[in-house]
Image: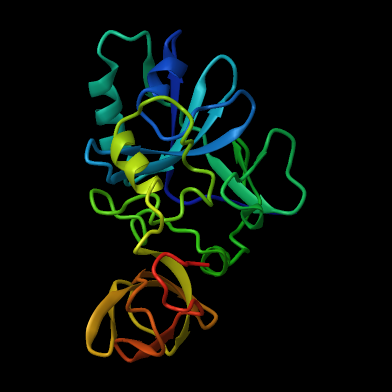
Amino acid sequence: MTAEEAPNRTVLRLSGGDRAHFLHGLVTNDARPGQLVYSALLSPQGKFLADFFLLDRGEDILLDVSGDLAPDLYRRLAMYKLRADVTIEDSGLPVARGLGAPPEGACPDPRDAALGWRGYGMAGGDPQVDWDAIRVDRCIPETGIELIPDDSYILEAGFDRLNGVDHRKGCYVGQEVTARMNHKTVLRKGLVTVTVAGSAPVGTPITADGKPAGTLFTQSGGQGIAYLRFDRAKGDMTAGDAVVNWPGDGAAGEAP
């Protein structure tokens, strides 16, 4: 088993009789008893604000979020709480993650089996896994890099594939915009894994035939995660001094 402490995570604890109902009306995926669930909070305009993991332990729900997003998320949850019977507090629990056989009490990462497991209140060892290499290979976005608050749309970021949105649940904040995008025949833009010859800083614009075609983000092992306009993503593209190529055929919405 390979395990380490996940960096810069805050675990909020939600308790009180209305906790599940409260979250149901706000986030893209519902907590399920004993399962780790990936979810997000959106703006009323349907744009990404924060992604997180939910773990319903019966007596409370743990919410595992990036430490950078935690203060704003706490403020927003407190604003929506009104008179609901919900208490929100910092649990202080550390987050461990790893590959191989999970320890007792750990849960599979719901986004992709390649990401192993996550556990709460358990110790992790020294970092030993190249998580960026896994993310790039599986096209898994990360908050603050590919997932940009008040800018990203979760379906363009692959939340369907990552089990981060339930289109069958009731209304939640930003649901109307997300539903409209879901019912489109194809998406015209989105995150994909590309090949990269050379390297470029995260956030470097990608051009194709001199026209803007997207943005290059995390890179590892000759690959990268890119946000592309599918209609322009044909042949060799450039990102700074790097040459970028998408294995797709450039047809709108046909992201791998």
Q: Quadrant of the N terminus?
A: bottom right
- Expressed as whole percent of the image width and height from the top left, the position of residue 197 reads 45, 90
Q: Is residue 13 left or right of residue 237?
A: right
Q: Is residue 75 left or right of residue 135?
A: left
Q: How many marks?
A: 0
Q: Residue at x 63, y 63 (%)?
A: 128
Asked where in the image residue 100 lies, by quadrant, the reply is: bottom right
Q: Residue at x 61, y 23 (%)?
A: 33
Asked where in the image residue 131 lies, by quadrant, the reply is: bottom right
- Expressed as whole percent of the image width and height from the top left, the position of residue 93 reads 51, 33
- Expressed as whole percent of the image width and height from the top left, the position of residue 12 reads 42, 29
Q: Residue at x 35, y 55 (%)?
A: 147
On screen, residue 10 above or below 199? above
Asked where in the image residue 212 lies, by quadrant, the reply is: bottom left
Q: Is residue 255 left or right of residue 2?
A: left
- Expressed as whole percent of the image width and height from the top left, the position of residue 165 reads 46, 40
On screen, residue 195 above or below 114? below
Q: Residue at x 37, y 79 (%)?
A: 233
